[in-house]
Amino acid sequence: MRRTLIALSLALLATPPASAAEDVATTPQTALRPVLVVKLLGLPADSVARGVMLAAFREEMNASRLRCEKRVGGEWVPGDSVANAFQFLDAAAPDVAWTLELSVRVPQPVRTNVMMQKGTTKEEAQLIRPRMSNIASSRGLVVAATASPPVLHGRRADFEPVPTVVSLYFADARRIVVPSPNLPGGGYAYPWAEAGRVLARAALESLHRTSGALDAVHRADLAPGTRVAEAQAEAP
């Protein structure tokens, strides 16, 4: 069942919207490099959350530019965006397609009981089961994205993939379930769409850095996510 879900997710990601496919076919930007997702692990189990995250991911991957930060004097500050040189296609030859292996670690969902209306009988209450909510146990997200160039002559010569790994949290996510002994951290309204966009930008950072289109003093802007390293450095 899990393999089926992963396969469906990859199919959803690989097939661009009709408008995007038409743009690729009619735009004379021959420098666009096809990219395929060959592995995608760790998506939320809930189908609604997963669908929202994947839709936002694909939209951000198809954006014309990648928002970036620049390292200045030891600090990362907002920088210029760069043109996105990559485009998802539903299929491409191995000798021209870049590939992505993606893994995410999302928070555990919080199970809450369905609110019972006044007058609900004991028998009716027993039929009500805990439901999976859109509430998460934390605001965090971990992303690992590994980009690989096209296969040349059946192999990738002298290439060792280096994953882009980022840990972050969404500072603006609201806590809507108060802490309790069973849930010490409480529960948060998790921003699944923003998580999808952050995943896309981390993937694009890996693609552009591996291809040489992004130097060491630039990186993807993951706002509204806050990178954990920066948050720890700013702590008193």
Image (cartoon, helix red, strand yellow):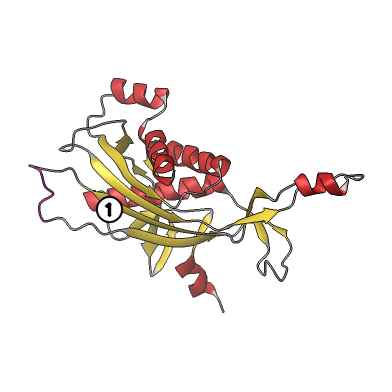
User: Where are the magenta residues, as a range?
Assistant: 154-158
Going by the image, does 24 lie left or right of 47?
left
Instruction: Tell which residue pokes out farthest to the left in this image.
Output: 153
Q: Residue at x 52, y 73 (%)?
A: 234
Residue 208 among those drawn in magenta = no
Q: Residue at x 33, y 58 (%)?
A: 164
Going by the image, does 132 lie left or right of 14?
right
Going by the image, does 175 lie left or right of 59?
right
In this figure, which residue is indicated by the disc labeled 1? Answer: 209
Q: Position of residue 88 (x, y in %)?
A: 33, 35
Inspect this view and state whether residue 233 appears. yes
Helix or strand or loop: what does disc 1 sit on?
helix
| Mark 1 residue type | Arg
Magenta highlight: main SS: loop
User: In the displayed structure, would residue 24 be above or below residue 68?
Assistant: above
96 or 45: nearer the eye?
A: 45
* Image quarter of the N terminus: top left
Instruction: Tell which residue pokes out farthest to the front in this image.
Output: 123
59 or 186: nearer the eye?
A: 186
Q: Residue at x 46, y 53 (%)?
A: 222
75 or 2: nearer the eye?
A: 2
Inspect this view and state whether residue 63 appears. no
* Image quarter of the C terminus: bottom right
Q: How many marks?
A: 1
Q: How many residues crowd mark 1 within 10 Å: few (<14), some (14–19), many (20+)?
A: some
Q: Residue at x 29, y 48 (%)?
A: 207
